[in-house]
Image (cartoon, rainbow, N blue to C red):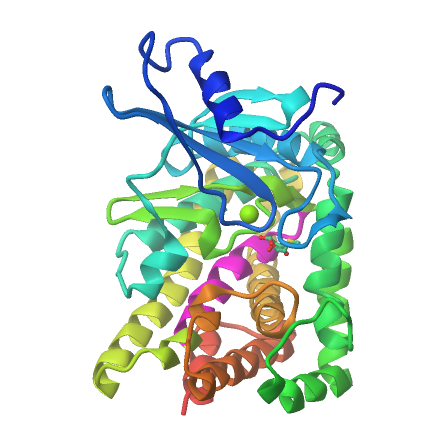
Amino acid sequence: MSNYHAFTEAEAIEYARGIEGMFPEGAQLVSREIGDGNLNLVFHISDPVSGRSVILKQAVPYAKVVGESWPLTLDRARIESEALIIQGRLCPDLTPKVYAYEPDLALTVMEDLSDHIIMRRGLMERNRYPLFAGHIGEFLAKTLFFTSDLAMNQQEKKLQVKAFINPELCKITEDLIFDDPYTDSPNNSFDVHLRDAVESIWADTELHLEVALLREKFLTKAQALLHGDLHTGSIFIKPDSTKVIDPEFAYYGPMGFDIGAVIANLLLNYAGQEGWSPSDADRADYRRYLLDTVRDVWTEFETRFRALWNEHAADRMAKTPGYQDLYVAGLLQDTIGFAGAKMVRRIHGLSHVADIDRIEDAAVRERAQRLALAIGTALIKRGRSARSIDEVLDIALSATK
Ligand code: SR1
Ligand code: MG
């Protein structure tokens, strides 16, 4: 990576000008750095005259959210572009087009999706997306099934596992999701009013056992190629279209981690609705929509995953009667446990979510935080015995005062 340097906006324009066929000769290009994630630079380059535009996403050699004191591999740009290409082959309508990847610059050139909005923002504006559950169910079913031992030649799959070894980004997850929130770690960050709730999580050894088991699955269960960070900030959406972006945390891991991430972020928004002050009926109505979406995400995934299995399973042993039912039952349990862990980390871990942090009134924010912790810890504890997605809805409803 000797030619690597982080682009300025002017350099991003010069680079974009050189992309063959992208912009008309002599176009006056405009660049905006729009990266609002934790890790990367994202340049939006456009030509106001032709209306053409493109995204340049560049990794920087550290975690942007913390600064240069936290070095981070540039190889994540390779992982991201390779994962995007695989996901794009499996789900062309649900992913951005990748035009180029420049290893020396840790740079991916991709489709501009500015006609969509980030789903987290859409949910914070209380939009409804009736097609979302079907879209994400399809993305999850196809990307997880076709990259697993169920559908792949097992020798080829092992080579893929090797290509997607992603130790530095996995370590972020191992620490920030499966360790720090359960101990008095300097990485944690929380409002002082929450200390009693956080301390009881630090002391809850029954909870720690479940988290240790989830962590073990994350560390060892190379079931399928995961997106690895499938929160609602990694989804661009508009009413008729869903696009999954940002798979730099991709690696071979347990399928339930991705499904659980989607469900966790719907539930974090559910908790964040504390900060909305319409009539009680309107809040309950939007929350009902979110819970229906949680249930639909699972059922859309399950239906499609079983259909793919019945039609495309390559492994003879996968056709053994009873195996599919046990496999899917295990996926549901993993999904619920991981969903809980993904909620808890966003309340008092290093990195939070705007759905809750943007609530200005401290007392209201505290109510939302406590609700998210109550739902998250209950999901973690329920995971291993869960039999139905409806249990998630029941947990959310009974935690809501
Ligand atoms: C230091 S990175 C913090 C978080 O941002 C990413 O989106 C992942 O969720 C990670 O855990
Ligand atoms: Mg990201």
The percent coordinates of residue 241 (x first, y second) are 30, 43
Of residues 209 and 316, the one nearer the viewer is 209
The percent coordinates of residue 384 (x first, y second) are 65, 73
Q: Which residue is drawn at 57% across and 22% down?
A: 101
237 lies above or below 82: below
| Left or right, residue 198 beside residue 30 | right
Splitting the image into four quadrants, where does ligand 1 fall? bottom right
245 lies above or below 200: above
Specify the quadrant that holds the C terminus: bottom left
Say which quarter of the image contains residue 292: bottom left
| Left or right, residue 347 beside residue 115 | right
Of residues 9 and 235, the one nearer the viewer is 9
Q: Is residue 140 magenta?
A: no
184 lies above or below 23: below
Q: Residue at x 71, y 47 (%)?
A: 169
Q: Residue at x 61, y 46 (%)?
A: 39
Would residue 322 be visible to someone looking at this image? no
Q: Is residue 265 magenta?
A: yes
Magenta stretch bounds:
253-270
| Labels in figure, total | 0
